[in-house]
Amino acid sequence: MSSAEVVQILTLARSKVENRWVQNKAYDSYGGVCMGHALDTSLSELLRVGITMEDRQHACDTVVRMIQRRYGHHWRSIPEWNDSPTRTKGQVLAIFDEAIALVESMIPPEVEVVEKVVVPRIHTVVIPPPAPEEAPKSILDRVKDLVGV
């Protein structure tokens, strides 16, 4: 297990939540994810670069430790905490930030992170409704008009 790999998992998971966060389900059709699903999918994406299940477990344990440190020991799981009705996206991102800072503080200064994970920003395309004077176009024609094809 390497702290640098755990930071990669946490950083990628945080970016997924930052793009769109959901509660009471793992994900939605708009690309939103809960905290736990963000961690799981980050591991899946990073397996090919040597991240292990042990790294994922360490990332999850660190997140639970941060939740318990900030919000109390009665929180036993990431989904339970994520789905609390009073939870906010800001609180979820803050827990990721604290977990990342904790793990980074455990990386010896002589260890250099070889590859930082760069997550592309996901942009939402809003397809406007057709103007009333136009005959309705197919969704494909409207997308072509928007992207200039």
Image (cartoon, rainbow, N blue to C red):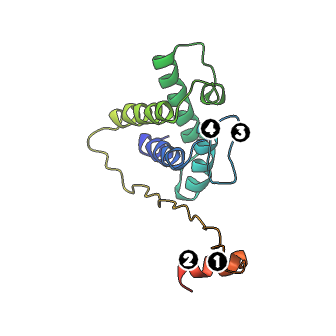
Q: Earlier in the sequence, mark 3 or mark 1?
A: 3
Q: Earlier in the sequence, mark 2 or mark 4?
A: 4
Disc 3 to disc 2, how far (Cα)? Answer: 32 Å
Res. 97 image quadrant = top left
Disc 1 to disc 4, how far (Cα)? Answer: 36 Å
Q: Amino acid at mark 2?
A: Leu
Res. 48 image quadrant = bottom right
- Residue 144 is left or right of residue 120, and the answer is right
Query: Percent from the top left, x then y, of residue 27?
Result: 68, 46
The answer to whether 136 is drawn above or below residue 20 in the figure is below
Q: In the rendered image, which residue does mark 3 sit on?
A: 25
- Mark 3 vs mark 4: in front: 3
Query: Percent from the top left, x then y, of residue 109?
Result: 26, 40
| Marks 2,4: beta carbons within 8 A | no
Q: Earlier in the sequence, mark 1 or mark 4?
A: 4
Instruction: Classify mark 1: helix, strand or loop.
Output: helix
Q: Earlier in the sequence, mark 3 or mark 2?
A: 3
- Mark 1 vs mark 4: in front: 1
- Numbered label attached to residue 142: 1
Instruction: Classify mark 2: helix, strand or loop.
Output: helix
| Marks 2,1: beta carbons within 8 A | yes
- Numbered label attached to residue 146: 2
Q: In the rendered image, which residue does mark 4 sit on?
A: 36
| Marks 3,2: beta carbons within 8 A | no
At 60% from the left and 30% from the top, the residue drawn is 82
9 or 28: nearer the viewer: 28
At 33% from the left and 33% from the top, the residue drawn is 105
The answer to whether 104 is drawn above or below residue 32 in the figure is above
Q: Residues within 10 Å of mark 2 (few under 14, many from 20)?
A: few
Disc 2 to disc 1, how far (Cα)? Answer: 6 Å
